[in-house]
Every structure is written in structure tokens, then in C-alpha cells.
Image (tube, rainbow, N blue to C red):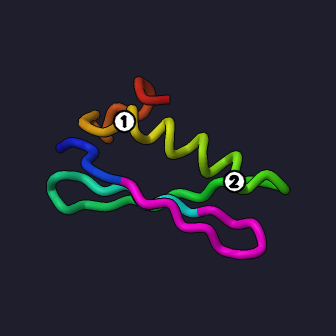
Amino acid sequence: MKISDFVVYKVKPRWIFIKINTDEGISGWGELVSGTKTETVVTGVKEMCSKLIGKNPFEIERIW
């Protein structure tokens, strides 16, 4: 199983959720804390996630 895609959802006023999809159709959800810097956090998570494409989602410690 490999990470294949991710989608970032911004919900006003400052919530951010991320959905990570795998090549086997399994998805996982996460939440980010942005404070007042929502766009900065969204940009950072998109940059980080682009490096996770193709990685095994079960290697949590290695990814972290």
C-alpha cells in the first residue's frame, strides 16, 4: 500500500483537515492547527505531503 494523493480542506474560521488516500482505496483523515496563519499552514502541508506520495502509510515513525 502506498500514499497516492491528498486533499486539504479549509473550513472557516481557521480549521484545516487533510484526507490522505492510498492506492488501495483506503483513506485517512487528520486535523491541523493553524492559529491565525491558515494559508501558511496549508502551504506547508502541501509541500510536505508532496514528498509523501509513494510512501508506505504504515511507516509512521519513519515518515514523522
How far across and how far down the image is residue 63, in percent?
43, 29
Q: Is residue 54 above or below residue 38?
A: above
- Hey, which residue is sitting farthest right in the picture? 36
Nearer the observer, disc 2 or disc 1?
Answer: 2
| Majority secondary structure in the magenta region | strand
Q: Residue at x 65, y 74 (%)?
A: 11
Q: Amino acid at mark 1?
A: Leu
Residue at image coords 69%, 66%: 15
Residue sitting nearer the eye, 37 or 2: 37
- Which portion, as a residue range, is magenta? 6-16
Q: Is residue 30 left or right of residue 62?
A: right
Query: Circle 1 — which element?
Result: loop
Residue 32 image position (x, y, % from top left): 64, 54
Q: Which callout, 2 or 1, points at the residue further toward the start of the chain?
A: 2
Q: Which residue is mark 1?
A: 52
Q: In terms of image quadrants, where is residue 58? A: top left
The secondary structure type at the circle numbered 2 is helix
Magenta includes 11? yes
Q: Which residue is mark 2?
A: 39
- Report how far apart the C-alphas of labels 2 and 1 lie in the structure: 20 Å
Residue 48 location in percent, x, y?
49, 36
Using a 10 Å C-alpha cutoff, classify the residue at mark 2 as few (fewer than 14 neighbours), some (14 to 19) or many (20 or more). few
Residue at image position (31%, 52%) is 5
Q: Amino acid at mark 2?
A: Glu
